[in-house]
Amino acid sequence: MEKAPEEQHPVKAFGWAARDSSGLLSPFKFSRRATGDKDVRFKVLYCGICHSDLHKIKNEWGSSKYPLVPGHEIVGEVTEVGNEVKKVKVGDKVGVGCVVGACHSCENCNNDLEIYCPQTILTYDHIYHDGTITYGGYSDTMVANERYIIRFPENLPLDASAPLLCAGITLYSPLKYYGLAEPGKHIGIVGLGGLGHVGVKFAKAFGAKVAVISTSANKKDEALGHLGADSFLNSRDQEQLQAAQGTFDGILDTVSAVHSIQPLIGLLKSHGKLVMLGAPEKPLELPVFPLLMGRKMVAGSATGGLKETQEMIDFAAKHNITADIELIPIDYLNKAMERLAKGDVRYRFVIDIGNSLASTNH
């Protein structure tokens, strides 16, 4: 007989979970493992809401296991460390992103690219080494192996920097890997949402010339005035697209809806790179001829390894980069998911776990 979530581990935990593909979230009692020799336990203070949380609670990718506690932009304060932990101490500000485990022996792990390990263990809705399901950050306490713990510098506000653990590294990593994190590069960011808006900030901090490419003409003022982009391209305006043909070194496409990438390939210079970061549910059409004629590349990127995630957080602290957030109490969660599905958030919801979760535990 399988043990109830409350009895699988010795440490009591409380959060909000989806019970089925309706995606409706409600209070949920479960448990976390005891703090192992190399584990760090922390009190969760804030957790960002990522678009993948929405996909997962509704089982839109077909792999969800219920009850499901989402959340992989988790920040808080260390309450206990295992006796072999050297990285952090009690009272430190820390976070956990999208991954909590991997094999630690493959080529990817040896190169600090745990996210690309074939046996990577995701922060929620995955099977941990001990055979139990992983539960995410919509909860009061979190425990993880110290390899997966990110240290937060004092000057970074925890609430607004929580989304950097997913959205931030998702943009930072491809900018670095594909050689786009250099002064003077002309970079396009497609889609001005949770991912796109931090992409603008990181690309600008690297010294790039940044254009926001969007189907929503009403985002122009926000892109130029508030986020500091250098230009705005309405991707529905053929004249604007024509005028910008062949001018971009790289384009980061954050759109997760099915869309045509042919116009984006046309915007690239010869040898330019289109990097896909959104995850459309159906395959996109790939026009090959324009790739051949310009030696262009269409590539992908996930988040990043733990070493690079720490580097990204330190870079964000140095350049004062945070996400633009709407802080919500946990009992607003279902409403927030409805709004997220409609794209009605500027630009990331963050749950105020520390101040609102306990009051829903009856």
Image (tube, grey):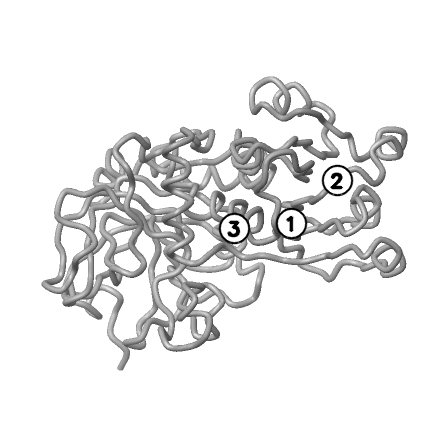
Question: Distance from label 2 to label 1 (Cα)?
Answer: 21 Å
Give the farthest residue toward the left.
83
Sequence-first tag of 2 and 1: 2
Which residue is drawn at the image coordinates 62% and 55% (left, top)? Answer: 279
Please indicate, yes or no, whether residue 50 appears anywhere in the rendered image. yes
Q: In this view, does 220 lie above or below 124?
A: above
Label of residue 256 in the image: 1
Contact between marks 2 and 1 (CB within 8 A): the answer is no
Going by the numbered disc 3, the residue's amino acid type is Ser
Q: Nearer the viewer, residue 163 or 289?
A: 289
Quadrant of the drawing holding the C terminus: top left
Question: Distance from label 3 to label 2 (Cα)?
Answer: 19 Å
**Residue ID for mark 2:** 248
**Residue ID for mark 3:** 173
Question: Distance from label 1 to label 3 (Cα)?
Answer: 18 Å
Q: Is mark 3 on a helix, strand or loop?
A: helix
Sequence-first tag of 1 and 3: 3
Quadrant of the drawing holding the N terminus: bottom left
Q: In this view, does 52 lie above or below 112?
A: above
Please indicate, yes or no, whether residue 339 appears anywhere in the rendered image. no
Picture quadrant of residue 292: bottom right
Going by the numbered disc 2, the residue's amino acid type is Phe
Which residue is drawn at the image coordinates 53% and 32% (left, top)? Answer: 201
Q: Give the percent coordinates (x, y) of residue 73.
A: 39, 47
